[in-house]
Amino acid sequence: MPDSVKSQTKPQGADTQEVKAEEKDAVVSAASTQVNLKDPTQTQIYLRMLKYIKPYWLMFVLGLIAAVPSGAMDGAIAWLAGQGLQKIVVEGREHFIYYVPVAVLIIATSQGVFRFLESYCIRYVGAAAIRDLRNELFAHLEKQPLLYFQGQSSGVLIGRMINDVAIIENAISQTFQSMISRMITLISLAAVVILQSWWLAIVALSILSCIVLPVGILGRKIRKSSRKSQEAIGDLVSVLSESIQGAKIVQSFNLEHFQTTKFHETNQSFFHNTTKAARHEALLSPILAFIGAAGIAAVMWIAGYQVVNNHMTLGSLTSFIIALLLLYSPIKNIGRINGVIQPALAAATRIFEVLDKVPDLIEAPDAKELHGVPHQIRFDKVCFQYPGTNQQVLRNIDFEIPAGQLIALVGLSGSGKSTLANLVPRFYDITSGAITIDGINVNQYKLESLRSRIAVVTQDNFLFNTSIEENIRLGRIDATREEIEQAARAAYAHDFISDLTEGYATQIGERGVRLSGGQQQRLAIARAFLKNAPILILDEATSSLDNESEKMVQEALNNLMKGRTVIVIAHRLSTVRHADRILVLQEGSIVESGNHDTLIEHNGVYKRLIEAQFERQEA
Ligand SMILES: Nc1ncnc2c1ncn2[C@@H]1O[C@H](COP(=O)(O)OP(=O)(O)O)[C@@H](O)[C@H]1O
Ligand SMILES: [Mg+2]
């Protein structure tokens, strides 16, 4: 036997893992290069966010209306306090001693009511808008083709789903809730100030307006560092989820230290950017305080002369200074809001980037339902290349599976078998050629209809973190308990399920970790039984199992294959031998085809593959 075949076939398991690791690297680097392609303007982002508020406009308007009196009453209190002082102390009108405090109390009480209305309405709208955004985001993700998920790290996506949305929610409620009433407060106080002495107001307000400058500069910096820290969160989630899901690999390769270092580095980057944002935010506060103090000092100085020279009443000066002091808080708040809005704008940009990703896999406008059984499948000069790569994975694939027949794909790891099988349920669109089912191109069928007719069992079937019953039910959501049991029996799973103390209600843990490989596999087969699809794809469904469980799983599979059109990828001779036809793949091309006996007689690639396998078993 030639050396090349031997060396290629031996480390099959290792091979696949290397391929997977390479894929992952490619995926990670692809994800990190595709950040922020275009930066929409702030106005565009605001307008787009407003669309989410629109359905709740009534409540929103109510909140805004309530904000007006609630904010204006600050001005009223400032004015009242100064005027009261003037009447009582300067003019000696004693009964005002009673009027003023009562008026202040009444104003404060009604301000409380309006504040409540304002706060509740706006928060409600914020929460509702965010709920809708989150739903839309998830529904959009579910529409994306497989390649989309393979093209980026799950941490980044999860980060967007959870963090970015939370940041926006915070911004919506804080912005509208405080900004609107603060604005009104600002206006009412400014009105009081101007009414008391317009030129003094100009002096004070022009000093206070210097605030705009530091807010603008620091705001930009805050935005930048919080964008970076959000990206770091995505990376943190990535490392974390990989370490949890890959705990076994991490431990068996002693990668704990490696992973810990990676985590520390990412965490450090998060720390660095958070502290940077904190530094800028912290800097903002004393700068604003200083500007405020300078404004007050200037007013005291100028107005002091005015009062002494009788150009201004004491009451006016009091109102003026109270209003000015009250002004400081809303201005500071509005400055702070900028620190909330900036990260939210960054978050919204990232979320809209996800929402704007049009799914590549498009359903034809007049897509058809796939009916009838069993189906005939045809590949017509199919070529395929994974998007973003420059190598053809499949070349000129040409074959037909008559209805109800079993076809086997064999070939070395990486020769394109899984890729070929994945094209039938249209997980990817082909580069050229055509794949037809019953004479009609797969891209002319409704995706849902097409996929409902195809069951796929691979070596790594995703089990959900719920009960056994619910996991099998995924095959057909409306199945009854009897049907589920029937499927489990056909898959040789009923016995082991019944032996569990909680039977079908047993929780199987994340990805089914509480079950053995063979048990997981039989659940996946039960799921496929329940789905009862006329086309079946088995991709190395038994390859990760030991001999004992393999036998059982193989029998379950034999049951499952009956009466369906089957594509089987198997490393086991026994399955392949009974195939109606065997296709031998080599580097993406079919190099041999025929049944077992003719291929052995042909004395080519197939025969060498079989011999190599035989040797492996002997060893
Ligand atoms: N999602 C993917 N993106 C890019 N290349 C891929 C992807 N999946 C597989 N490949 C490449 O396609 C080739 C065929 O892979 P595959 O169909 O999995 O082979 P097999 O199932 O025969 O082992 C390999 O070179 C592999 O690296
Ligand atoms: Mg494969």
Image (cartoon, helix red, strand yellow):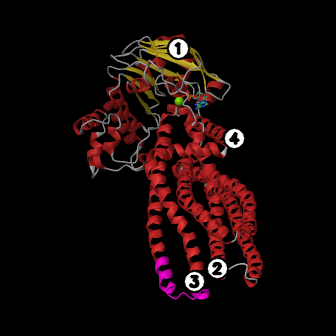
Under tag 2, what secondary structure? helix
Is residue 91 shown in magenta? Answer: yes
Which of the two discs, 3 and 2, labels the residue nearer the N terminus? 3
| 567 or 579: nearer the viewer | 567
Is residue 614 shown in magenta? Answer: no
Q: Position of residue 408 (x, y in %)?
A: 46, 20
Q: Nearer the viewer, mark 2 or mark 4?
A: 2
Tag 2: amino acid: Thr
Disc 3 to disc 4, C-alpha distance:
69 Å
Identify the residue under disc 2: 318
Disc 3 to disc 1, C-alpha distance:
92 Å
Identify the residue under disc 3: 87
Tag 3: amino acid: Lys
- How many residues crowd around disc 1 within 10 Å: few (fewer than 14), some, or many (20 or more)? some
Q: Is residue 594 at all visible to an observer of this figure?
A: no
Q: Where 595 falls versus 197 (above or below)?
A: above
Image-based side of 342 in relation to 477, left or right = right
Disc 2 to disc 4, C-alpha distance:
59 Å
Tag 4: amino acid: Thr
Q: Position of residue 60 (x, y in %)?
A: 47, 52
Residue 33: which disc? 4
Instruction: Tell me which residue sits at (63%, 30%) in the image.
Output: 7
- Residue 298, image quadrant: bottom right
Q: Nearer the viewer, mark 3 or mark 4?
A: 3
Q: Nearer the viewer, mark 3 or mark 2?
A: 3
Instruction: Tell me which residue sits at (68%, 39%) in the image.
Output: 38
Q: Is residue 616 at all visible to an observer of this figure?
A: yes
Residues drawn in magenta: 88-104
Q: Position of residue 182 (x, y in %)?
A: 58, 63
